[in-house]
Image: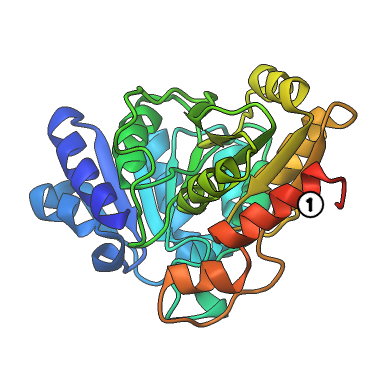
Amino acid sequence: MREALGLTLARLGEEIENLVVVTADVGESTRARYFGERFPSRYFNVGISEQDLIGVAAGLAIGGLIPVVTAYAMFMMRGFEQIRNSIGRMNLNVKLVATHAGLSDFADGPSHQALEDIALMRSLSNFVVVAPADAWDVERIIPRIVEYRGPVYVRIGRDYSPPITMDLDYQFRIGEVYPILDGSDIAIMGHGPVLYHAVNAAQNLRSMGISAAVYNVPTIKPLNEYEVTKIAQGFGSILVVEEHSPRGGLGSAIAEIVSGLSRVRVLGVDSYGHWGRGEDELIRFYGLDEEAITNEALKLLRNYV
């Protein structure tokens, strides 16, 4: 996913002359250096100082530029006060692209695994919050958020990017919900790489005679209330899967809308994270793999919530 980010930013630099990239000494890790190598005068490294990172980006935006800010999701949250006061409160045109989100920084463990960032960013009234499903989604989403006028938070992982949207033909639009599989008995909704496991779970359920739909919800805020309500009314049972705390993420956002219309179960990471040999290993460890999703869907359908 970070490779797709770096290549997309470098391509956009050719097309958008006032696009700049700002990073906090993680140009290699986030692949922002691809932009810096081609446009050194439009690339700024502020060092390991995330609060300054946000302040510099705010100043660049006031000057009429379009700053894309890259940092690890966990450490970008160090600048939350500046994000709130300097970007959100001033409604500045800054794009925060947080990498290594969720469990994707498996080797560095809990100190580097951002599992609360969506909850924080959802709380800011005028921010758009987006989480691509895979590398192909990153390529679709980054150009659209750069052209959007206003503050945006984009959450992406590190490398783990099983194909989820590769064969889907759609143009990303902020607020849209995208069906991956059709179904009639239960809706599985989510964002990020865990959707791959959701699709596999839906196939498992079909072998049991249960028709499960799977939806990619890349825009967590503003959530498409019309589409989510229609899904809730059509199914009556929604299972949300996400590499995030079960509190404050997409599951909470959906529950806020469909309370009284549908049963909602959220599968998330109720922890500060863990070490592992790969992101997929941690997804299994925290019960976000196809077996766990299958079992939770069955329990939800049987009213064992």
| Rendered position, 102 above or below 301 | below
Identity of the residue furthest to the left in this view: 38
Residue at the spot of label 1? 299
- Classify residue 214 by image quadrant: top right
Residue 150 image offset from top left, x and y in percent: 49, 29
> 64 or 99: which is nearer to us?
99
> 172 or 277: which is nearer to us?
277
Residue 230 image offset from top left, x and y in percent: 70, 18
- Classify residue 166 by image quadrant: top left
State the count of labels.
1
| Rendered position, 64 above or below 60 | above
Residue at image coords 62%, 69%: 286
- Classify residue 301 by image quadrant: top right
Q: Is residue 64 visible?
A: no
> Looking at numbered disc 1 in the image, what kind of residue is underneath it?
Lys
Residue 189 image offset from top left, x and y in percent: 61, 39
Image side of residue 174 versus residue 43, left or right:
right
Image side of residue 109 versus residue 277, left or right:
right
Residue 24 image offset from top left, x and y in percent: 36, 64
Image side of residue 239 versus residue 278, left or right:
right
| Rendered position, 218 above or below 231 | below
| Rendered position, 183 above or below 195 | above
